[in-house]
Image (spheres, grey):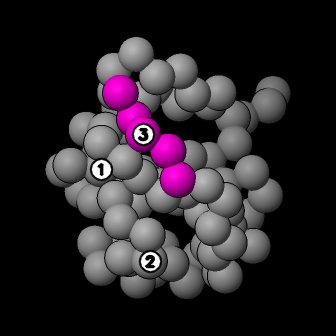
Amino acid sequence: MYCTIYKSAKKDDTYLYIEKEGDFSRVPDSLLQLLGDLERVMELELTPQRKLARADAEQVRVQLRTQGYYLQIPPKIY
């Protein structure tokens, strides 16, 4: 499965993964407004063996299939 990753202009270290480049049809409008302008960062292939820095690749794949997007937010720092 391939996906395209976008970086939020409003929210630091927040990334939106979608299935097809430029197709935000399954992303809620309220989320798009919250994220502001989105900058395309990269396209990559997600496989079960793929390692991602801040997300589980299988969880990303499941969310892309079920809801059409995956939102990566920065970890909470206590």
Dot 3: few (<14), some (14–19), or many (≥20) neighbours within 10 Å? few
The residue beneath circle 1 is 64
> What kind of residue is marked 3?
Glu
Mark number for residue 22? 2
In-image side of 57 versus 41 (left or right): left
Question: Of marks 2 and 1, which one's residue comes earlier in the chain?
Answer: 2
The residue beneath circle 3 is 45
> What kind of residue is marked 1?
Leu
Q: Nearer the viewer, residue 36 or 22?
A: 22
Question: Of marks 3 and 1, which one's residue comes earlier in the chain?
Answer: 3
Can you say whether 70 is above or below 52 in the image?
below
> What kind of residue is marked 2?
Gly
Quadrant of the snapshot with the C terminus: top right
Residue at 18 percent across and 50 percent down: it is: 66
Query: Tags 3 and 2 in contact by the CB under 8 Å rule?
Result: no
Residue 38, magenta (yes or no): no
Dot 1: few (<14), some (14–19), or many (≥20) neighbours within 10 Å? many
Query: Tags 2 and 1 in contact by the CB under 8 Å rule?
Result: no
Residue at 52 percent across and 53 percent down: it is: 43
Extent of the magenta region: 43-47
Residue at 57 percent across and 28 percent down: it is: 52
Prevalent SS, magenta region: strand
Position of residue 7 measured from the top left corner of the image (x, y, whole percent): 67, 62
Dot 2: few (<14), some (14–19), or many (≥20) neighbours within 10 Å? few
Q: Secondary structure at mark 3?
A: strand
